[in-house]
Image (tube, rainbow, N blue to C red):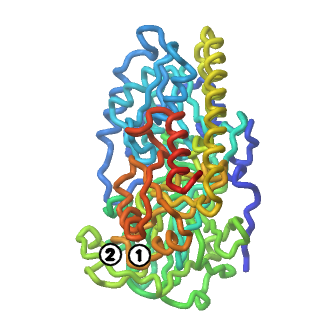
Amino acid sequence: MNRERDAGSAEARRAGHETPRQRTDHVGRPPTQRVPAPPAEDEDTAMLVPRRAVCAVATAALLTATSACAGASGADDGELVVISTTEIIADLVANVGGDRVSSSSLVPPGGDPHSYEPTPTDAGRVTRADVAFTNHLLLEEQALIRTIDNNLPEDSLNVSLAEISESYGARVIPLVENIGLDVLWLGLRVRGDGEEHGATRSSRVELRATALEGPGDLAVYLTQTLGAPEVYYDSANGFDDTDLAVLPPAAHTHVNWAFTEPGVYRLGLEAALDTGEGAPVELGRDTFTFAVGVDPHTVEVEGDAVILDDGHTDLTVDLDTGELYAYTDSGAAGAEQLVVPAEDAVIDVPNRAREEVPGDERFSFLGEPGALVFQLPQAVLGKHVHGEIDPHLWQNVENARAYVQHIRDTLAEADPDGAGTYHERAEAYLDELGEVHDHVRRTLAEIPEDNRQLITTHDAFGYLADAYDLTVAGFVVPNPAQEPSVRQVNTLTDTIRNLEVPAVFMEPNLVRRTSVLTQVAEDQGVEVCTLYGDAFGEDVGSYVEMMRHNADELRRCLGGA
């Protein structure tokens, strides 16, 4: 067995082995350095480009045109114009900036930063900004990040708060994905920073399917939140230039892998980096082997066979070395992940992975309705592109205090005359947030230990659980190719029953994802309560209100004193 152990912490893997104080905002510069904005691009700005997606050239062209026509940055009344990606960040900015700052969010109230697609109007707003704040760590849709990086004036400040938050005392935690599937969970990933190739957070990494050997066909596709499939690779008519997936640097995503016949398959992949300047940089190419419905131990490969048959694995391109390999926790100890060279990897797609093709005509690319395919599921419904670190830092109030300090220093750099005001307001707000942190801690401590279990619609509360002694027991994970199966509903039911939780929690801005959770909760006589994760809502209009509401709601619904 030839397994290369990938050394280093999650922090080092994410940041190219830099220390927290050395780390940049992944635009290849310190977070508040003034540099020319990247040139506008007239190409698809989607986070992940599906094979049958509609081309977004027209939209990108509108963004560029808006940029060209917009006036200089700054407000007519002398206020510092600050745009943020989320209303949570915009609220933090407003509390620090006061009357000296015009603070607004690109994602509208109640919107989801994971999926929000910017408009030409948003691009125009960016051209008039003196400061732009993003959360990043791949929280936001890359199209939104690209709109900021391509349209922000060259003398404005572009700051990713989460990227440098540790230097202000924030605590970051790995994004742990431990969904219990009985087959391998296989995705796509980009590692490395690609600095020598000029990669930035706005770059595009293309993973193309080039060849398939095997007894049947392969389709790799994403199932969106509302059930619609988007196809990335489909061998039925041979591969061409449209058989590709596009990811940002330092990201990974979840997809379905469906094979029509049992046997041994060998899939050729090649990678390229598009920085937006000149021709794409060709990276590596390699071949991965799949054992579909056959004993993986009988499959021959070029190297020393490593069978990947459980846990989480990503077919990965490394921007620094150009290599393609499998990055896996299959067979690894604890949370350790291993690098398995492509020539060693045997990916097991067992007979128990067989699924029926849904009757929905949108899935006709898989075959006739009712036909059996061998499928490794994407596990998390909907587009789910993210990095190594959980980006939802603000669910720990102490991390929000780190954001505030970073915002204070950035505003003072952009507007030195207002530095005294920003420091004074920040100190007052930090005191208020300290009181909120104490309130959340005291309130959640009143919940009986046996009841401190969170079952939610969205994996956004890891920091809340980590900081305030809760446990994330699960979130809704429907079958990615069709409606949730009886087994999956039973699993959710068993979790609620076995843990004896008195309540489950939905997010108002993700209400369309809650049908299974709500139905099971009703069947078990469990209350459905409300938590706010990425956005405000009718009951809360500020970060302080949101965190107080979440604490009070958790205590009320989980049986606090």
Residue 224: percent from left, percent from top = 36, 59
**Is residue 454 left or right of 362 when viewed as pictured?**
right
Direction from residue 301 to residue 77 in the image, left or right: left
Q: Residues within 10 Å of mark 2 (few under 14, many from 20)?
A: many
The quadrant of the picture occupied by the N terminus is bottom right
The one of 393 and 319 positioned closer to us in this rendering: 393
Q: Is residue 560 visible?
A: yes
Q: Amino acid at mark 2?
A: Leu
Residue 436 place in picture, x, y as percent? 61, 35
Marks 2 and 1: in contact by CB < 8 Å? yes
Query: Is residue 319 in view from this perspective?
Result: no
Relative vertical location of residue 276 with respect to residue 254 in this rendering, above or below: above
Q: Earlier in the sequence, mark 1 or mark 2?
A: 1
Q: Write down the residue under mark 1.
A: 258
Question: Height in image: 304 above or below 508?
Answer: below
Could you tell me which secondary element the residue under label 2 belongs to? helix
**Which image quadrant is residue 383 in?**
bottom left
Image coordinates of residue 558 in percent, x first then y, are 54, 56
- Amino acid residing under circle 1: Ala
Of residues 17 and 544, the one drawn nearer to the viewer in this rendering? 544
Q: Secondary structure at mark 1?
A: strand
Which residue does the numbered mark 2 point to in the structure image? Answer: 366
Residue drawn at 37 percent across, 42 percent down: 117
Q: Position of residue 534 (x, y in %)?
A: 48, 44
